[in-house]
Amino acid sequence: MTSLAESEDGRLLNVNADSAAAELARALEPLKVVYLSEKGGLFDGNGGKISQINLDEEFDYIMSQPWCRYGTRLKIKEIKELLDTLPQSSSVAIIHPSDLLKELFTNSGAGTLIRRGDKIQKVSSLSGFQDLGKVKETLTGDYKDISTEATVDRFIEFLAANPFTAYYDDSMSCLAIVLPPSADRPMATLATLNITKSGWLGNVAENVFSAIKKDNPCLYWTVSGADENLTWFFEKSDGSFNCNSSVLFYYGCDFNSDALDSVYRDFVSHRHAIIGDSDLESRLRRAA
């Protein structure tokens, strides 16, 4: 469609193509709006392409960044105004014209995907959850039998008696539980991180981990060496140790720090990445 308009006196007027596309999208309410751009997406201050933006969680932060200026700032602002008037499931993709088929017919997509997403919720008590049954279902994940349900119930009892902070999105496609430092744990512990496929694809995992990092300057966690998302955990850490087919990750502390030394000794002395009773993933694997 040519983006032209007609004035009251019959003159043809040129219309900004983005504005015309936005008005058309408001009328059609599509699942996805695709903008073709020679740049192939939006870029951050380091020149890296931004793969995904969840506006409900990241808009204020992105708009406060020094690199978000001129055309980038205007584009993000206009897209937010558009998505605010469309269904929650709608999204906007900014891609290079050569990536159109990849964007339409593959799951990986291309360029920058922008959606409203979900805000990250944070609670510090079991009573803060609106649906504890949904929490248990998320914690159980793919381990579904009587023994694993009992393991999750014991973990819930553990949380009832100990301080923690839970981070999750509205649909609970990502749920993380962090235990603060204590006499037994010199560093904050990521006790569990449950992420569904949509949580990975929708960038929710990134937003949850960013929220965790804001609250916890130092953190450690363990992951099975066979985890298919192991590369992502390496990217989030400052260092790691591999032992007994499990990997200990950490960030925010020096390699030779006393706190990390204590954590490392505990990690090596146990099998199956069991760190106390807080490591739910290890307990579920044992129960399974």
Image (cartoon, helix red, strand yellow):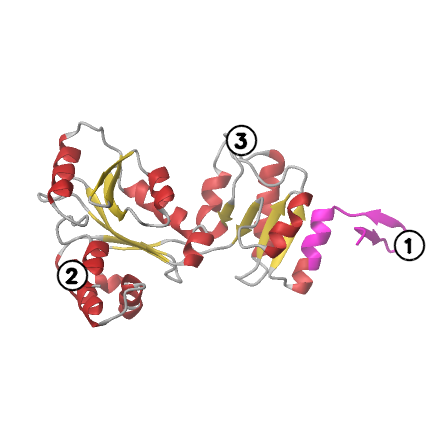
Residue furthest right as drawn: 10
Q: Is residue 2 magenta?
A: yes
On the image, which quarter does residue 145 sit in?
A: bottom left
Residue 76, given in percent of the width and then of the height, sits at 57, 44
Q: Is residue 136 magenta?
A: no
Q: Label 3 belongs to which residue?
A: 47
On the image, which quarter does residue 198 sit in?
A: bottom left
Asked if labels 1 and 3 touch by Cβ distance under 8 angstroms, the answer is: no
Q: Which numbered disc, 3 or 1, marks the residue that appears first in the sequence?
A: 1
Tell me the residue at 70%/50% (across/down).
19
- Asked if residue 64 lies left or right of residue 287, the reply is right
Residue 83, given in percent of the width and then of the height, sits at 57, 56
> Toward the viewer: 66 or 91?
91
SS at mark 1 in the image: loop
Quarter of the image with the C terminus is bottom left
Tell me the residue at 58%/44% (across/down).
111
> Which range is magenta?
1-24
On the image, which quarter does residue 91 sit in?
A: bottom right
Residue 137, given in percent of the width and then of the height, sits at 30, 67
Tell me the residue at 73%/52% (across/down).
20
Q: Is residue 12 above or below residue 128?
A: above
- Asked if residue 37 lies left or right of residue 144, the reply is right
Q: Is residue 192 above or below residue 71?
A: below
